[in-house]
Image: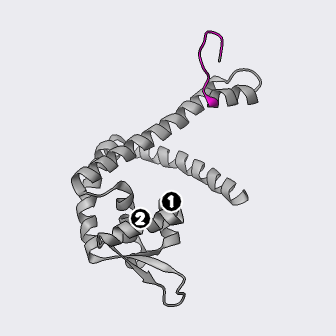
Amino acid sequence: MIPGGGCLSAVNLFIIKEVDGLPTRGDLERLAAWSELHRADSLLRAELSRRLEAEAGTTLLEHEAVHRLVIAPGRRLTMYQLADALLVSRSGATRLIDRLEQRGWVARRVAPQDRRVVRAELTREGAAAFARMSAVFAAAFEERFGGLLGDADVAELRRVLARLLAAGETSTASG
């Protein structure tokens, strides 16, 4: 609690505890930027998912998995590669492939050189489903992201995100 009965968020308590004095305007701006980045990502993903579910009968994660297979060499990826690309756990990728396999969009293939390696391979039905769902995705993406940003905006956003991603990869590699 703070004087006057208000509450500080956990982030504000952390900043005030770890920094001598109150947070600077720059600290607050950085927190606001982080919050807005998270909110923008959440809202965009929610809208893309809503549209895909309503108009194509699929989820955003299913779309992303099929898209990864469409662009992969030979239209196949190992379960590990798919999990890493989608930022899901290995078991989450397995459950996802179970669903896609039930729909006929993916087939599991055991690697002939190493039977411990299982690959998810896009089927003809999966490619046809991707053609249908990609039109829905493209329209929603253009409405909510691509059509709102000019070339300079995209270049600046990619520059900033590349720096954040590089810092994350550096800390992951050293940790």
Disc 2, SS: helix
Give yes or no for residue 30 being in the magenta stretch.
Answer: no
Category of crowding for the residue at label 1, using alpha-carbon neighbours closer than 10 angstroms: few (below 14), some (14–19), many (at least 20)? some
Disc 1, SS: loop
Residue found 48% across the figure and 79% down from its top: 118
Disc 2 to disc 1, C-alpha distance: 10 Å
| Mark nearer the N terminus (2 vs 1) | 1
Locate residue 158, reporting x and y percent. Answer: 49, 49
Residue 96, which numbered label?
A: 2
Residue found 63% across the figure and 31% down from its top: 11
Q: Is residue 43 above or below residue 137?
A: above
Q: Main secondary structure of the magenta part?
A: loop
- Dividing the picture into quarters, in which one does residue 96 lie? bottom left
Give yes or no for residue 7 being in the magenta stretch.
Answer: yes
Q: Amino acid at mark 1?
A: Val
Q: Residue furthest bottom?
A: 113
Residue found 50% across the figure and 59% down from its top: 88
* Magenta extent: 2-10
Q: Is residue 114 above or below residue 134?
A: below
Locate residue 105, reporting x and y percent. Answer: 31, 71
Locate residue 170, reporting x and y percent. Answer: 67, 56
Image quadrant occupied by the C terminus: bottom right
Q: Amino acid at mark 2?
A: Leu
Residue found 33% across the figure and 44% down from its top: 47
7 or 160, which lies in front? 7
Locate residue 25, reporting x and y percent. Answer: 62, 23
Left or right placement of residue 71 versus residue 173 in this view:
left
Residue 88, which numbered label?
A: 1
